[in-house]
Amino acid sequence: MAETVSKRVAAPVFELKGRMATLTVVRLLTTDVSAFAGQLAEKIGEAPRLLRGAPMLLDLEALSSADIDLGAITAVMRDLGAVPVAVRGGGVDAERAAEAGLGLLTADNEAPRREEAPACGATARVVESPVRSGQQIYARGSDLVVLGAVSPGAEVLADGHIHVYGALRGRALAGVQGEPRARIFCTALEAELVSVAGRYQVSDRIDEALRGQPAQVRLDGETLYIEPVCSYRTEYSLNG
Amino acid sequence: MSKIVVVTSGKGGVGKTTTAAAIAAGLAREGQRTVVVDFDVGLRNLDLVLGCERRVVYDFVNVIQGDARLHQALIKDKRVDGLAILPASQTRDKDALTDEGVAQILDALREEFDYVICDSPAGIERGAHLASYHADEAIVVANPEVSSVRDSDRVLGLLASRTRRAELNEEPVKEHLLLSRYDPVRVEKGEMLSVDDVQEILAVDLLGVIPESQAVLNASNAGMPVILDEDSDAGQAYADVVTRFLGGERPHRFLAVERKGIFGRMFGG
Ligand SMILES: Nc1ncnc2c1ncn2[C@@H]1O[C@H](COP(=O)(O)OP(=O)(O)OP(=O)(O)O)[C@@H](O)[C@H]1O
Ligand SMILES: [Mg+2]
């Protein structure tokens, strides 16, 4: 019977893993395909190692008209060796995206807020107000220090470390450009999700004993460690 | 110096309209010229809570569309001197409010009133945005439950980023928290968040706590802002709120479970 057959062959042949990856965003400013082709060829010519084979997100939000030939744009990109993987904005729906062989990203809540306290030097961005549900703060190229709490439904990101002196109840993603040495430090760990360089852990999987406690999150090899701040690399680990 | 104050929440049904009516009446009673504006176009009910639903001729949308002048649409309260209401339209939807129209009307109201209280619709969409956009101060109403507190948190974030003050980089909107429908018995049983829990999460100034009270329903059925029911717990709690809002000091009340005497135990259950 089908059921037993499918059971016998049920040894997994793949695993699904959630990873946060960085994508090169191609923000289109025109619907003119040939103009785009010309300039893209030039850009890729300037930095072939960086751009050839690079996964790219096609961002249509800056376009005033939704009237764009997605198929032609992606064909141009592929011809030039780029790898368009997803599209967002421009009123494109999942169906149109799929026709062009792309995934669809929704743009909800993506725009980082800008009106926080300015970064103090290049080393860290300091946020003095609480980070509230629905807000997203990204410290590009630096560490992020949050003096208040990060609410459930809020998201803080940094290319470097993240320090949270209030309770960390939302999501915190350190090293979002791939820096594996980035860490997250907080005085009370109640996070929905923590991530370093794309490795993440959700709240469900965080040890109850650490809930509400001062903690740090760091990456060692491929393993994400969530541990008390004070430890001298004791054996305390959650999933290692 | 006239002020625009939005009463907002994110989550629906938490007590915004009840609060807007009570505070507006309380401010007027203190001698402040006050107008309360219903931004809940399509679901107007501020006029019901204030008992003037039978005197509505023109509304907010009529004024915006130029079908009536502001003065024709304003309704003077019969009980409290110095209190006026600008009703919402029941027949239109929120798209009938334009950015410029709202700005013009609020500017005109500022000229004549000390306080312009904006009763926001629920949600964070256009209607709520318009109600909050021009605010100088905000009273964020929350109930002591997780979803309401979460929504209030979201709204506080929007007040800090999407208002006129935020966009012009002016001094931020002054935020107040009003915790409503507070039931100390259920808090004690752990069925509701406590005042401390909520303050811990939201980290804003606590303007007041309004108890869950039958008086609110009675008052709204009678078409009267509950603050005028001076014997009721909710009425007194709102009176404290108004005093604090005007800079006075009042201890918070109605936070603890009332221990019942022998009568209470015999009859109250
Ligand atoms: N302190 C209170 N005790 C008991 N009932 C209350 C209290 N405050 C409000 N209510 C009741 O809760 C209901 C909703 O109140 P209200 O209309 O003021 O909320 P709202 O936030 O304006 O709702 P909406 O989001 O639909 O505009 C009403 O029936 C009201 O009588
Ligand atoms: Mg209402």
Image (cartoon, coloured by chain):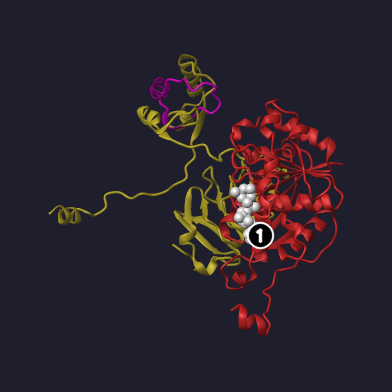
Q: For mark 1, what is the residue?
A: B218
For the N terminus of chain B, the image quarter is top right
Which residue sits at x=51%, y=18%? A39
Number of other residues with Cα within 10 Å of mark 1, as a class: few under 14, some 14 to 19, many 20 or more: some
Q: Colour of chain B?
A: red
B143 shown above or below B169: below
Q: Nearer the viewer, residue B168 or A60?
A: B168
Q: Secondary structure at mark 1?
A: helix
Which residue sits at x=26%, y=49%? A13
Chain of residue at mark 1: B
Which residue sits at x=72%, y=54%? B225
- Horizontally, residue B136 falls left or right of residue B214, namely right
Residue A169 in the image: state x and y as whole percent. 58, 57
Q: Which chain is yellow?
A: A
Task: Name the quadrant where ligand 1 sits.
Answer: bottom right
Q: Which residues are magenta?
A: A59-87
Residue A38 in the image: state x and y as whole percent. 48, 16
- Horizontally, residue B83 falls left or right of residue A84, namely right
B38 shown above or below A91: below
Q: Quadrant of residue A99?
A: top left
Task: Indicate whether residue A70 is drawn in magenta.
Answer: yes
Task: Indicate whether residue B223 is drawn in magenta.
Answer: no
Residue placed furthest toward the front: B54
Type of residue at label 1?
A: Asn
